[in-house]
Amino acid sequence: MKIGFGFYKHMLNREQYDFAVQCGATHAVVHLVDYFYQGDQGDGNNQPIGNVELGWGYAGGTPQADWSVESLKALKAELNDAGLEFEAIENFDPADWHDILLDGPKKETQLKRVKQIIRNVGEAGIPVFGYNFSLAGVSGRHTFENGRGGAETVGMRGIDEVNTTPVPNGMIWNMIYDSNAPEGIQPEIDHDELWRRLEGFLKALVPVAEEAGVRLAAHPDDPPLDYVRGQPRLVYQPDMYQRLLDIVPSRNNALEFCLGTLSEMTEGDIYEVCERYVKQDRVAYIHFRNVRGKVPNYEETFIDEGQIDMRRIVRVLKENHFEGMLIPDHTPQMSCPGPWHAGMAFAMGYMKALLAED
Ligand SMILES: [Mn+2]
């Protein structure tokens, strides 16, 4: 197995790459769009864009991601030079696929655009592309000082207004893609309609991904509730991942397997769930993190503090010959001058020790 490190867009520099390598990372996951935070302190996580709980502002003010082959190859060369393999990109830009998610008028144009992105990613030699087919995105959580030692972490204490406030027109994935959209809220759709949209997306994209040598990897819904902000969710119980895989039976239709989110779900045994999907060879990579509780009452924890026995997960992975990458995804913040980096370094050291065991 490989140990990876995730870089947000504003972290794409040599100091951050060196930090990751010092933590034991050999592989990199890159976000070319900063969804959550725009930090200029270098510690990844300290300047929220917009309203943290109700959604983040777009991106109108930040440059669009550059998906050209040259730019991707240049980034790959930078990572390689620092000693990292470029294993995956995580997430499309809402500007590139909002009408695929919403079944809007630009859907066909945007399908062409995301197909070209996948071809470019393949041509640059990047083997995995993670995505989350979601309207409301990651939203509706609160921050608590509930990690060990009072560490700051995120979670939920029941359903409240941040989970039920409808998504306004012009917003997808917490980001405003059209600031001139008519006032009002997005029309509510049902689960069948959302699955129909996903089916169209996968049937169009997976053949392109196969040809490009790229594995599309789906993240489950975080938090895994049936509805968030008035819109349905796709994968909020472990079995729903199977439905997604069965739409197009291909190794290139794969999973960005988030242990934390899966363990927050109200059904399933996390070890059996892990074994079930790894056995099918459909797990592209793993968000290796821990939580305590189930939706709608849970919190993210330090890697050794939550309800998942991470050592047992590693045993399941080894028994099933999983060869892919693990990344910490996110961790509680630690009380020191580098809260985000300290949390990551702690998780990385723990992972490295687990993988070194027989
Ligand atoms: Mn995750």
Image (cartoon, rainbow, N blue to C red):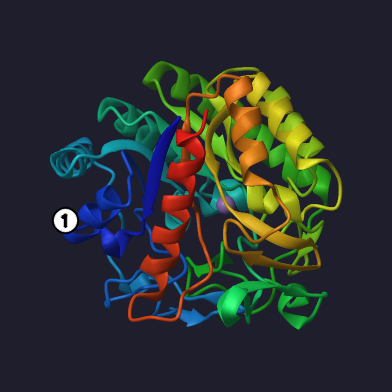
Question: Residue drawn 79% across and 52% down?
Answer: 265
Location of residue 109 by image quarter: top left
Q: Residue at point 20% right, 53% down?
A: 18
Q: Quadrant of the N terminus?
A: top left
The amino acid type of the residue labelled 1 equals: Arg
Front residue of 178 and 358: 358
From the viewer's perspective, tell me whether residue 83 is left or right of residue 92.
Answer: left
Residue situated furthest front in the rendering: 358
> Where 164 falls versus 187 (above or below)?
below
Q: Is residue 337 above or below residue 206?
A: below
Q: Is residue 112 visible?
A: no
Residue occupying image coordinates x 63% and y 55%: 290
- Drawn side of residue 163 relative to residue 311, left or right: right
Disc 1 under 8 Å from ligand 1? The reply is: no
The answer to whether one can see residue 230 in this image is yes
Looking at the rendered structure, the secondary structure element under dot 1 is helix
Query: Who's the residue at 25% across and 57% down the image?
Result: 19
Q: Which residue is mark 1?
A: 14
Give the crowd class for mark 1: few <14, some 14-19, many >=20 residues within 10 Å. few
Relative to 53, say whether 277 is above or below: above
150 horizontally vs 49: left or right: right
Q: Splitting the image into 4 quarters, where does residue 264 fall?
A: bottom right
Q: Position of residue 272 (x, y in %)?
A: 78, 32
| Residue 163 horizontal/vertical position (percent) | 74, 73
Observer-nearest residue: 191 or 316? 316
**Badge count:** 1
Left or right: residue 138 compared with residue 130: right
x and y, in percent, of residue 302 in the image: 57, 63
Q: Position of residue 259 (x, y in %)?
A: 64, 46
Residue 166: quadrant of the picture: bottom right
